Image (cartoon, rainbow, N blue to C red):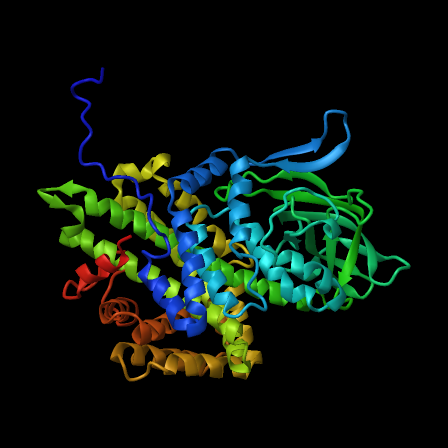
C-alpha cells in the first residue's frame, strides 16, 4: 500500500507520443519553403513517419538505453585472436537502422535531397544524437569519393543505400555500408598537414600500405574510413576498408575507446595502422583539398545537429512550463518565465531557419549558392554551435531540479551540447575560415551580401547591423584578432535577414530587437516586455 503522503501532483506528463516533425512549425515551414511543390507530398509523408517515431516512447527508450549502456571494446576473442571489435547495445542498431532506412545518408543526387535529409536529421537527432556521427560521416564522404569515379561507382550506392548491415564483411557482398573518418593525430588535430602517418606505395596503381596512429577515429565499426597520410607526394587522402576483398580483416588496431563528456553512445577510438592496406583517393599531395567537400558537409551537420538539440531543449522546457502550476496558475503564463521561453524559442528558430537555408543551397548547386556556402557554413558553424550549450543550460533550468535529474533527459542534452562546436574544427578554425573566404574568394562575400541584402529596408535594426558588418569588412588588416567577432556578427545578420523574410513578425521583431538592436541582455529572458511573447511561446509549443 502506498503511503498516504505519497500523492503525486503538479508534475507534467512525459513529452512522448507526439510528432517531432509536425509539431515544429519553424522546420515544417522551412521544408515547405525550400522544396519544389512536386516533392512536398512525399517529404511530408516520410518526415511525418520519422517525426512520430522520434517522439514515440519506444524510440525515446532506445535513446536512453544506448547512453546508459555505452559501447564496449573487444580487442580479442575467447581464443586470443585479435578482432578489434566494438559491441553496442541492441538499441544502437535499431536507431541506426531506422535512420539509414529513412534516407539519412542519401541526399546526393536525390531531388531536394539535402533539404529532406537535413530536416530528417534535425528530427531524428532529437531522439538520440550519438548515432548521428556515423550517419553524418557516411553522408559527407560522397563528395570526396567522387574525385575517383571508380571508387565512387563501388561505394556511393552503398553509402546512400537505405539498408543497414551491421556485420563486418567485404563491401562487395553488402547492400549498404557506413564510412568513418580519421584525420586527427596525437601531436595535434588542427594542423592536419603535420600528420605523421606514412603511406608507402605498392606496385599496383593507387594501392598503399599505411603505418601510423589516429588519435580520434569515430564509429570504428564502420565499413571503411577516409584518412590522411603522408605519401611521397605529400598529405594524401585514402580509403581504408575494415575488411579486404578476400574476406580477411585489414590491420586496424583499436587501442582504446575515449571516455567522453557526452556523445557516450558513440564509440570514438584511438587506432593504429601497421602496414594497413588502403586505396588512394584523389591525387598525391592533395589530400586536404580532396577532403574539403566532406568537411563542409559535416560542418553543416554540426549546425543541423545543434539546431536539433536546441529544438528538443526548448520543446521540453515549454512542455514542462505548460503543465507546471505555480502561484495560482500555469508557469508558462508567468511574465518572466514567458520571457525566458520566448527568448529560447527565438534562438532555436533562428538556428533552424539558417540550417535549412544552407541545406537548400546544396540542393540548388549554382555558382552563387556554392559561393554562399563557402562563407556561410563556417560562420554558421561558429555561431550556432556556440549558442547551443547556453541555450540547453537555460532550458534545463526551466525544469528546475527535475531538469537536473537524468530521467528528464536534459542532462544528456547538456552533455551533448558542446560537441558540435569542437567537431570538424573548433571556434577559432571556423572564424579563420571565414576570414580566408573573405580574402581569397570575392564571390563568397558577394553572395553573402546579396543574401542579407534581400531583406534590406524591412527592419531598421537589421539595416544598421548590415551597415556595421560592411564597416568591419572594409578593413581586414589585423582581422585575425577580431575574427570571432566578425564571424559571429555575420552569422547573426544572416539569421536576422532570414527571419525578417520568412518568420512571423513577432519572431523577427524579437530577434532584431534583442540580437541586432541591442535591446536585450546577455542572459536569456531579457527580451523587451512590449513584444508579443505569448505568440512566440505558443509557436514553439510541441
Location of the N terminus by quadrant is: top left
Furthest residue toward left: 328
| The quarter of the displayed image where residue 43 is located | bottom left
Is residue 325 rendered to the left or right of residue 361?
left
Q: What percent of the width, then of the height, locates residue 376?
A: 47, 71
Q: Is residue 482 above or below residue 425?
A: below
| Residue furthest out toward the top | 1
**Count of numbered badges drawn on the protein:** 0
Please tell me which residue lies in front, 253 or 382: 253
* Residue 36 location (% of width, % of height): 44, 74
Q: Residue at x 53, y 73 (%)?
A: 374
The answer to whether any part of residue 127 appears in the image is yes
Above/below status of 260 relative to 337 = above
Q: Position of residue 64 (x, y in %)?
A: 44, 37
As rendered, which of 74 and 246 lies closer to the eye? 246
Q: Nearer the viewer, residue 361 or 17?
A: 17
Tell me if 459 is positioned left or right of 474 in this view. Answer: left
Residue 365, position as x, y percentages in the image:
54, 76
Q: Is residue 327 left or right of residue 305?
A: left
The answer to whether any part of residue 394 appears in the image is no
Is residue 97 shown above or below 118? above
Which residue sits at x=47%, y=56%?
A: 121
Q: Nearer the viewer, residue 100 or 224?
A: 100
Amino acid at each position: 500500500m502506498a503511503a498516504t503522503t505519497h500523492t503525486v501532483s503538479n508534475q507534467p506528463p512525459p513529452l512522448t507520443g507526439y510528432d517531432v516533425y509536425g509539431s515544429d512549425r519553424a522546420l515544417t515551414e522551412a521544408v515547405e519553403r525550400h522544396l519544389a511543390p512536386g516533392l512536398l507530398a512525399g517529404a511530408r509523408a516520410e518526415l511525418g513517419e520519422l517525426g512520430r517515431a522520434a517522439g514515440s516512447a519506444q524510440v525515446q527508450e532506445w535513446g536512453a538505453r544506448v547512453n546508459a549502456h555505452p559501447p564496449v571494446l573487444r580487442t580479442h576473442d575467447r581464443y586470443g585472436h585479435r578482432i578489434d571489435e566494438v559491441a553496442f547495445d541492441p538499441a544502437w542498431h535499431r536507431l541506426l537502422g531506422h535512420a539509414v532506412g529513412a534516407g539519412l545518408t542519401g541526399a546526393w543526387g536525390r531531388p531536394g535531397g539535402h533539404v529532406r535529409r537535413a530536416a530528417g536529421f534535425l528530427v531524428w537527432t532529437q531522439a538520440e544524437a550519438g548515432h548521428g556521427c556515423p550517419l553524418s560521416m557516411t553522408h559527407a564522404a560522397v563528395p570526396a569519393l567522387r574525385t575517383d569515379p571508380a571508387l565512387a561507382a563501388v561505394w556511393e550506392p552503398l553509402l546512400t543505400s537505405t539498408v543497414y548491415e551491421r556485420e563486418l564483411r567485404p563491401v562487395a557482398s553488402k547492400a549498404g555500408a557506413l564510412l568513418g573518418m580519421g584525420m586527427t593525430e596525437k601531436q595535434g588535430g588542427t594542423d592536419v598537414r603535420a600528420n605523421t602517418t606514412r603511406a608507402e606505395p605498392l606496385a599496383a596503381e593507387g594501392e598503399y600500405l599505411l603505418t601510423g596512429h589516429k588519435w580520434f577515429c569515430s564509429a570504428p565499426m564502420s565499413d571503411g574510413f577516409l584518412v590522411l597520410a603522408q605519401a611521397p607526394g605529400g598529405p594524401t587522402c585514402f580509403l581504408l576498408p575494415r575488411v579486404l576483398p578476400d574476406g580477411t580483416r585489414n590491420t586496424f588496431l583499436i587501442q582504446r575507446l575515449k571516455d567522453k563528456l557526452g556523445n557516450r553512445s558513440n564509440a570514438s577510438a584511438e587506432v593504429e595502422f601497421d602496414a594497413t592496406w588502403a586505396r588512394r583517393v584523389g591525387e598525391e599531395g592533395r589530400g586536404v583539398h580532396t577532403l574539403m567537400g566532406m568537411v563542409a558537409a559535416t560542418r553543416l551537420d554540426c549546425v543541423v545537429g545543434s539546431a536539433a538539440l536546441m529544438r528538443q531543449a526548448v520543446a521540453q522546457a515549454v512542455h514542462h512550463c505548460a503543465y507546471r502550476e505555480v502561484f495560482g496558475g500555469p508557469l508558462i503564463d508567468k511574465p518572466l518565465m514567458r520571457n525566458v521561453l520566448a527568448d529560447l524559442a527565438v534562438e532555436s528558430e533562428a538556428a533552424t531557419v539558417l540550417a535549412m537555408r544552407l541545406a537548400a543551397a546544396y540542393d540548388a548547386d549554382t555558382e552563387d549558392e556554392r559561393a554562399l556556402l563557402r562563407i556561410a557554413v563556417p560562420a554558421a558553424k561558429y555561431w550556432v554551435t556556440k549558442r547551443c550549450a547556453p541555450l540547453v543550460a537555460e532550458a534545463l533550468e526551466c525544469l528546475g531540479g527535475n531538469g537536473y535529474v537524468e530521467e528528464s533527459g536534459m542532462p544528456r542534452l547538456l552533455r551533448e551540447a558542446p560537441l558540435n562546436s569542437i567537431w570538424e574544427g573548433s571556434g577559432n578554425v571556423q572564424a579563420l575560415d571565414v576570414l580566408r573566404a573573405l580574402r581569397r574568394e570575392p564571390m563568397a562575400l558577394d553572395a553573402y551580401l546579396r543574401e542579407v541584402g534581400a531583406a534590406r529596408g524591412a527592419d531598421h535594426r537589421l539595416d544598421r547591423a548590415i551597415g556595421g558588418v560592411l564597416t568591419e569588412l572594409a578593413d581586414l588588416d589585423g582581422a585575425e584578432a577580431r575574427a570571432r567577432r566578425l564571424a559571429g556578427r555575420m552569422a547573426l545578420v544572416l539569421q536576422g535577414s532570414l527571419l525578417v523574410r520568412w518568420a512571423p513578425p513577432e519572431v523577427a521583431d524579437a530577434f532584431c530587437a534583442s540580437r541586432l538592436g541591442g535591446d536585450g541582455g546577455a542572459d536569456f529572458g531579457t527580451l523587451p516586455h512590449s513584444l508579443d511573447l505569448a505568440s512566440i511561446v505558443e509557436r514553439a509549443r510541441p
